[in-house]
Image (cartoon, helix red, strand yellow):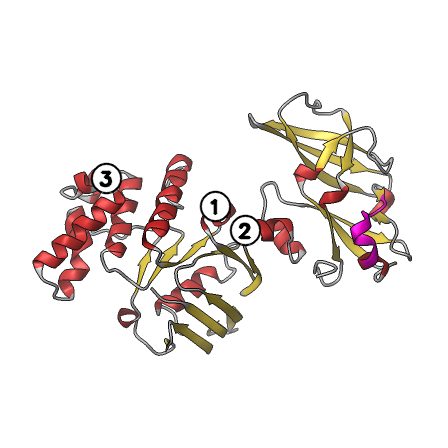
Amino acid sequence: MASVTLVGVRRIYPGPPPRVAVDNLDLSIADGEFVVLVGPSGCGKSTTLRMIAGLEPVNAGHLSIGDRLMNEVAPKDRDVAMVFQNYALYPHMTAYRNMAFNLELKGMSREDIDTRVKDAAATLRIEHLLDRRPRQLSGGEQQRVALGRALVRNPAVFLFDEPLSNLDAKLRVEMRREIARLHRQLGTTMVYVTHDQAEAMTLGNRIVVMHGGRAQQVGKPLEVYHQPKNTFVAGFIGSPPMNLIAGRLTPDGARFVSDGGVINLVPPPDWRVTLAKTGGRAVVLGVRPEHVTLSEAGPDGAAIHARVDLVEPLGQEVLVYTTASTNAASCEITARLASGPTPVTGETASLHLDPAGLVFFDAETKERLGG
């Protein structure tokens, strides 16, 4: 096992014009930690993983695995194993041979190879599949063989590049459990790339939210969810995402009024000191859908009247998409409600924003106020 450290790492693709794919990335992954890089397409997450693997050069900065600087080290000498989005199994080889092939190339003895392959197969519960070729395996079984091929190498670091994106929803959940179990059992350092925030939230000890080649926020999943550092993180993490409502504070910071006056509310007490310092400025109010309730009036007496655009019953919960508007402006607000009586599409509902769930961001910098 080993730690992974990136200091000021950059990857620039030559032009014209040159494109900065990863920009000044600082990241420290502890020995045995499971870290997930998550973000939209083109954010730099896969490029970061490929730099760790040695498949992309580091144009600036330092990348280390353990105590060893890896900038100029060949991929085969980095003691890492990578699991790809496409399983890249040899179609003419059995599952056993696919898992054993790299060990054969290293010149390991047949007995050692057999022990490693069978141990990995037992860990992944695929002993009964070792004689089958890839075309005889389901998607989930092929993914287990791909995991086994990485596992037999006994690497210091496992790297996963969107390994579940080709599986259906049920298999993705099943394989998430398998990978989490594998990490608990092995305790090996794992770096995992995905665009799926559900994977990020359920798998990672920490997640790294990336955008524009930069790490927007690094932290424990629930910490990132409840305390987003900026509006990008707030809008990306969470399904549905956080409601973001543009507006302005009164000069004393004692009241928030959204653009067009759709929402007019008194911030909760724990925000007043922070907001008093930024009174009169344009801000963005953030509130998670679970902190939006149906109510004629909240404790502060304020209710938001909104048209119901769509109701999505999901069994244990109901998502209600609404639009609150005045003659001057409108804003969309999504509510996540417990299963029960729900409004009807087209009618007007009265919404209340739970003060405990409110977050404020600077409208210009997009950063969370108060740190």
Q: Which residue lies furthest to the top in this view?
A: 341
Q: In which quarter of the image is residue 306?
A: top right
- Give the residue displayed 53% in from the left and 65% down from the top: 213
Q: Position of residue 96 (x, y in %)?
A: 16, 49
Which residue type carries mark 2? Pro
Q: Name the residue under label 2.
A: 221
Alpha carbon separation for disc pair 3 and 1: 27 Å
Q: Which of marks 3 and 2 is in front?
A: 2
- Give the mark, 3 or 1, whose residue is nearer the N terminus: 3
Point out the stretch of residues depicted in magenta.
265-273
- Tag 1's secondary structure? helix
- CB atoms at circles 2 and 1 under 8 Å apart? yes
Which residue type carries mark 3? Leu
Alpha carbon separation for disc pair 3 and 2: 34 Å
Q: Residues within 10 Å of mark 2 (few under 14, many from 20)?
A: many
Alpha carbon separation for disc pair 2 and 1: 8 Å
- Give the residue displayed 13% in from the left and 42% down from the top: 131
- Tag 3's secondary structure? loop
Q: State whether residue 92 appears in this view.
A: no
Which residue type carries mark 1? Thr
Q: Name the residue under label 3.
A: 137
